[in-house]
Structure formats: structure tokens, C-alpha cells
Amino acid sequence: MRKIGNVMKLKYFLILILLSINSVTYGQVRVTASLDAKQILVKESFTWKLEVEGSDIMPNVRIGDIDKIALLSGPMQSSNYTIVNGKTSSKKTISYTFVAMEPGQVVFPSVDVNLGNKSYKTKPLRLEIVAARGSGGSQAPTSQTVYLRAIPSKSSVYVGEPLTVRYKLFTKVGVYNYQVEKLPDAVGFWAEEIPQSAQPRLVSEVVNGVRYNTAILKTVLYYPTRSGELVIDPLKTELEIEVKSNQRSTRRFNDPFFNDPFFSGNRKATKNFLSNPLKINVKSLPEPRPYKFSGAVGNFQIRAGLDTNAVFANDAVGLSISLTGSGNFKSLQLPEPKLPEGVDIFKPERTENVSIKGMKHTGSKKSTYLLVPRIPGEILIDPIEFTYFDLKTQKYVTRSSGKIKMSVYDAEGSQPVVTSGYSREEVELMQEDIRYIKSADTKFTRAQTSSMGGTFWMLHIFGVLALGGAFAYEYQSRRLEGNVDFRRRTNAIKQARKQIKKAEKLSGDSEELRALLHQCITGFIGARFNVAENTLDTAEFTELLNRHGISQEIVDENRTFLEDLAMDRFAPGAVKRSASEWISATQELFQKLRRVL
């Protein structure tokens, strides 16, 4: 008996250990409050939900009276336990269902949640209740069994202001299926359908004392493009509904998505229904309009900047212009930069990331230009400005990026910058091709002619090789022209050699000499890996080389070189090395990097 008692005690002890371990695996407690909708119509229901993860205690919360809504049911409690790879997690949920009573903004305040000895606080939540125009009152055809209504969020808007229209179905019978072939015609509007779940959400609603089951079939966002009284045509839908029959039968396989106990009937019929047309008063934007205003309506921010603010002449630099915010994004064009003389600009690369959030378009647009400065010196680019109409303040607002400054250095020292469209290398080749005619006494001798001699074949072979070289040069030129990154990698060796040659012409105490040698090494690494070298420090260069599998010996040598060169640049005399020694060390390190990159 003593042995059995000891075994039972051991079992209880093990159970306690397991429970304590299990309670530890719940992890950090997280408390979240949420609403299942951000915008609803009057008389629609919605749910406020509180979720507690990582705690085995059911929270006890109470929501006080809130204007414009009424409690329909709740609280509803539920628990969920999950075990994944031996780790247990729990979730406790409390939900309340409310009904919207009148239009306006509703704020759910923060709620204090007490779990044991700890207290948590939720974030406040906002809800917009929109008046259901035409869905109730004397305008609602309550004598009909099934009808469709178009419900606008507003009846008067500005040009470019978003207008939300909900196409709402009211039915007293079962509906098995619906189909909408296309959106209604809306002359003077730009429209986009707001995605929603495949199965509409069922809501029970009383209209003039008659109970209906209602659901939103479609929600469309309209942007007016001109002023005046505009009309949105009715939406046409095909519904498969339940109709009465003399014979009764049981439904076994047809489960309508509007399933309700009071529905009765024995057969289905397909019928077409039309919503009501909508007349919208579209107001013109206020006058006078700013000179740079292009039709943007909403709330926007604009930013512009270069990927580097210091470059050599004839090197490429990227200029990015981005617009973020919310409004009529689809019809907007980003402003174009105005550049001073001496800067070439190429066609931009455009990207767009715009989606519908909170019944409006939100996101960003971006343009990236490739600039090539030709003349050394300080270049100032005028601020990039964007003007829009703010709906909240009903005023025009101009956002500016500020002036953009760029320093352009002459990579060739005293040599003039060639801006005729030819590179320096091409000009040098042309100079070598020019030969002056020299007058001299020439004696002509009769030569033996042969139609198939060695000279004949040599000329033909040389011609074929020249033609192939011309095609190869043209192919390479096109690749370099169309691919900035490839052009940069290809010219990396040539650019590094230029900087070393220029450094050899400078005096030993010149600060520019050490700057050129630093740019030679960092620029070569940046070009090979296609990164902006001016944004990296010595530690980041070391990490970059390690990440690409460069030998530790070269990585250490490169780090020591950059550290010593920086010290000698900013603390002259700290490193005992002459200009010729610095140039020699740069050439040696460059050759090692060239072999491995």
C-alpha cells in the first residue's frame, strides 16, 4: 500500500510539472481589440471583438453606452487551444454585436483588460456610419418581395472626390445565386469595384416595419471627372430566387447563402432586377486654381533626392521622385524635374503601388531618372513641387521637396570635358586615325598582278574581321546604353585606372590625391557589386566583401588600406607614407581586387 501511495504521489508530482511547463509555453500575452468593418450603413450590424492570446484567463470587460449605436447581443465568449511541435498556445475571445442607429463618426474608447496581476489597455477604434439614402422611409418599396437599391455615400461631391456606392439587396425569400455581368454606365465618372468576399454578409433589417434580409452585392468607388449633375445608370443583376409552388419538397442539396428559417418554397426561378439610378451633384473646384495644379484631390506628400550628391563629370546618378498619400491616384502624373544646362536626363523608370483602403485609394507613385552631369561644379536642381486640393480644409496645398544640390568633380584634372556626344576614348582614337599627307618623291615600279594572290585574301579576311568587330562594338554599345548597371560594371576598371593616373600627376601634399585613391578602391568595389559606395563605411565594405566570399587576406588588406588612408586624409602625418607609396599600394590592392571581383 505504501508503494502504491508513493506511485500516486509521483504521478501527481509529474502532472504538476507538466502543467507548469505547459503554462510557461503560452508565451507573451497579447491583447487586441478590432471591428469587423470600418464603414457601415445605418441599421447595419457590426461586431466589436476582443482577443487575448497567451493567457488561460478569460477576460472580463464591459463596454459602456456609446452614441449613435445600440447593443444587439453579447457578450459571446469562446476559447481556442492549439498545440504545434509540443508548444501550446491559447486564444480567448469576447465579442459584442451592435447596430448603427444614426450617421456619424463613432469612437470606441480604450478598454482596460485585467488578467491576473497584470493590466492591459486596448487601442481606441473608429467607425463611420453612413446614411442609407433611399434604403428606407417612404422611398423604400416595402410592398416588393425582392428589390435592389443603389446607396451613395454622398449626394454632392467635388470633381476628383471619391464617391462610394453600395448596391444593396433586400429580400423576403431565399436567394441561391446572383450574377452581375458588368458595372453600370456612369458618364463623367471613373469607376473601380472594391473587392469583397465571394459570399455577401447577411444582415437582418427592418424597413418601415417590414423585416428584410439584406446584403451588399457590390461596392463601387466612383471619381467624377467633370462638374454638373451626373447620372449613374442602374445596376442590372440576375438572381436565382425561391418562389412558391403547389407541391412541397425538401431541400437537401441547395443551401442558399441567404438561409433563414422563415423562408419557405419549393422551386427556384431566375429573374432580372435593376437598381435605382443615381443623380450626383458634382461641384467644380474653387477658383482661382494654382498655376501648377493638375487635378489632384486628396492628401499627398512628395519627396525627391539623389542616390549620391557627389559625382565625377560624365558619371551617372539617379534622381528619385516619389508621391505618397491618398486620393485620385489613377489620374495623377508626377511632376518632372527642371534641370540646368550641362546635365543630360534620360527617360524615367516608373513604379506604382496603389490599393484601396478605407474606401479610398492609398499608396505611392515613383519615377527614377538617370542624370549624367557633363560640366564640373556645383549644380542646384529646383525644388520639385506638387499641388493638390485638400478635401478637409477645402484649400489648395503645395508640397515641395526643397532644393537638390549636387557636386560634380572633373575626373580628368585640367583636361577639357568633351560634351559633343563622343567619349574621351573615342576622341583619342579619332586623333590617332588622322594622318597628315607628306609630299615626297615616289618611284613607281610595275608589279605583278594576280587575281587570287595573298594580298587579295588578306584584304578580304581583314574586311570580314573589321565587319565582325563593328557588329560586336555596336552590340556592346547597345548593351551599355540600355543597362546602366552593366555599363557601370564594365567601365569600373577604366575608371579606376583614370583616377590612379590623375593621382600620379598631383603633388604629395595634395588632399585631392588621397581622395582620388579612396574613390579608386571604393568606386571599383561599388561598381562591381552594383552598390552606392558613397553610402558605405569601411566596416560595411568589409562585410560586403565577406558576404561575396572574398578571401580573408584581401578583405583585411582592403580594410587596413581604407582605415590608414582615411587617417592620413583627415589627420596628415599620422601615417608615415609618401604619395608614391600610397599610389603603389593602391595599384597593388587594385590588381588583387580585379582578379577576384
Image (cartoon, rainbow, N blue to C red):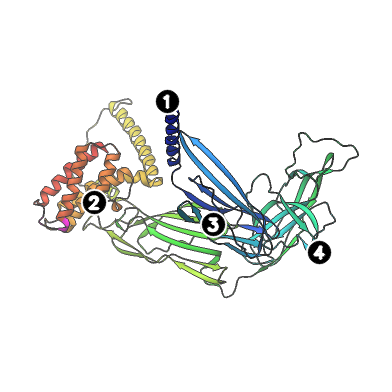
At mark 4, the secondary structure is helix
* Relative image position of residue 161 (x, y in whole percent): 61, 64
* Disc 4: which residue: 138
Q: How far apart are marks 4 and 3 (CA)?
A: 37 Å
Mark 1 or mark 4, which is nearer the start of the sequence? 1
Which numbered disc, 4 or 3, marks the residue closer to the eye? 4
* Relative image position of residue 512 (x, y in whole percent): 18, 57
Give the image quarter of residue 143: bottom right
* Relative image position of residue 432 (x, y in whole percent): 24, 46
Q: Which labelled disc corresponds to residue 2?
A: 1
How many residues crowd mark 2 within 10 Å: few (<14), some (14–19), many (20+)? Answer: some
Residue at the outermost right position: 246
Name the residue type under label 1.
Answer: Arg
Residue 436 visible (yes or no): no
At mark 1, the secondary structure is helix
CB-based contact (under 8 Å), mark 3 and mark 2? no
Q: How far apart are marks 4 and 1 (CA)?
A: 85 Å
* Disc 2: which residue: 519
CB-based contact (under 8 Å), mark 2 and mark 4? no
Name the residue type under label 4.
Answer: Ser
Q: Which labelled disc corresponds to residue 362?
A: 3
